[in-house]
């Protein structure tokens, strides 16, 4: 039935069940029918995007193709298309971590924040329980480079070693008031926090900023929206907040599909870092497109892919943050 016709009815759970074709048989055909009807209904109400709507590339103006187009054009199954997309993300993840340089520096501010990713089901005795999965990340205010790591424990013993590995020790750190960050001032060149239960910027926009000596921070780290004069010569306005990393989380989550798979989420985190840290160095859209094609097109980038998969007899690059700390791949071996 056309979703537009269905939507004209008086909706209730029984009518919806009839439309979706839900029955007690649970056959493969009935499940497929229910899924198809449900997808059409969700698209009609704009809960999910209409992937069949034509769209053009902003650079070459050619029509963009979805995953379904890829399957049809290449005569491959959905499973094969998904596998190849995952393979490309593996390459991006390996390069992003292998070439990663700690964020920040002596005049830089690195914003650090945690964000909830999903709940993961696991068995505890005879009961099923849920474990919340979080990601820890940071962004440099100067370079806009990022890092993101999935963490299942949320204590100082877990977080501080990650921060020390991913952030230059000369950086100034901005965090929220979570207790695990309390010792950041001992390992970094300054630590400021903001209490999100009270405000999102410390001090708030309507109040005077913190005045720092000129040259303490790069211009990108300062608050130039403040119109008042400094209390003395040689001072510059500064505020503590984590708005840049929170905005980066929103951008990341718009690309991560709903999932409870750590491997799947790690792939998207690696791709996110690759796009921000490697493609982000290329200013023009044309340059980004050419770099993306060079790195992801198997036929034209064999030499690049060999960095990750070097062949028989050589150790490949690792794909995870934990493994990169002790990488023994063919590029790192003595």
Image: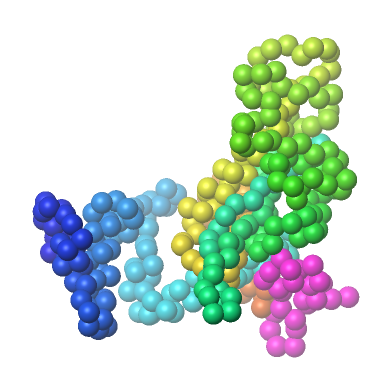
Above or below: residue 190 compared with residue 35: above
Q: Which SS does the magenta portion mostly show?
A: loop
Q: Nearer the viewer, residue 195 or 100?
A: 195
Looking at the image, which residue is at 61% across and 69% down?
91
Task: Name the quarter where the C terminus is drawn.
Answer: bottom right
Above or below: residue 312 compared with residue 90: below
Above or below: residue 43 compared with residue 193: below
Q: Is residue 33 left or right of residue 224?
A: left
Q: Nearer the viewer, residue 48 or 294?
A: 48
Residue 279 lies, in percent from the top left, at 61, 53
> Which residue in the rendered view is the most extreme toward the front?
126
The answer, for residue 91, to whether it is visible in the render is: yes
The colour style of the image is rainbow
Residue 330 lies, in percent from the top left, at 78, 77
Residue 203 lies, in percent from the top left, at 69, 26
Numbered range of the magenta stretch: 310-334
Task: Name the quarter where the N terminus is drawn.
Answer: bottom left
Residue 276 lies, in percent from the top left, at 62, 51
- Residue 286 is one of the magenta-drawn residues: no
Looking at the image, which residue is at 51% across and 68% down?
260
Q: Nearer the viewer, residue 168 or 72?
A: 168
Looking at the image, which residue is at 26% across and 77% down?
31
- Residue 329 is one of the magenta-drawn residues: yes
Count of numbered marks? 0
The answer, for residue 162, to whether it is visible in the render is: no
Looking at the image, which residue is at 79% across and 67% down?
325
């Amino acid at each position: 039935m056309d979703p537009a016709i269905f939507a004209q009815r008086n909706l209730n759970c029984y009518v919806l069940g009839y439309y979706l074709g839900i029955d007690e048989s649970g056959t493969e055909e009935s499940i497929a029918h229910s899924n198809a009807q449900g997808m059409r209904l969700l698209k009609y109400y704009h809960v999910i995007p209409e992937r069949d709507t034509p769209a053009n590339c902003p650079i070459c103006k050619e029509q963009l193709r979805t995953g379904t187009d890829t399957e049809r054009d290449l005569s491959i199954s959905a499973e094969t298309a998904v596998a190849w997309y995952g393979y490309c993300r593996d390459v991006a993840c390996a390069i992003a971590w292998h070439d990663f340089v700690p964020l920040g520096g002596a005049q830089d501010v690195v914003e650090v924040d945690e964000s909830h990713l999903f709940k993961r089901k696991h068995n505890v005795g005879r009961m099923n329980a849920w474990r919340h999965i979080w990601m820890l990340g940071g962004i440099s205010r100067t370079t806009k480079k990022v890092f993101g790591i999935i963490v299942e424990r949320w204590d100082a013993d877990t977080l501080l070693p990650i921060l020390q590995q991913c952030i230059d020790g000369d950086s100034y750190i901005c965090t929220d008031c979570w207790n695990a960050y309390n010792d950041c001032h001992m390992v970094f060149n300054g630590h400021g926090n903001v209490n999100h239960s009270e405000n999102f910027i410390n001090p708030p926009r309507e109040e005077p900023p913190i005045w720092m000596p000129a040259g303490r921070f790069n211009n990108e780290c300062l608050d130039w929206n403040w119109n008042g004069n400094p209390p003395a010569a040689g001072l510059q306005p500064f505020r503590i907040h984590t708005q840049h990393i929170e905005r980066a989380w929103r951008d990341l989550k718009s690309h991560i599909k709903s999932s409870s798979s750590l491997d799947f989420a790690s792939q998207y985190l690696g791709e996110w870092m690759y796009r921000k840290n490697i493609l982000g160095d290329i200013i023009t859209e044309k340059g980004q497109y050419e770099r993306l094609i060079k790195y992801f097109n198997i036929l034209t980038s064999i030499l690049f892919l060999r960095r990750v998969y070097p062949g028989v007899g050589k150790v490949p690059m690792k794909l995870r943050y934990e493994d990169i700390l002790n990488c023994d791949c063919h590029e790192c071996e003595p």
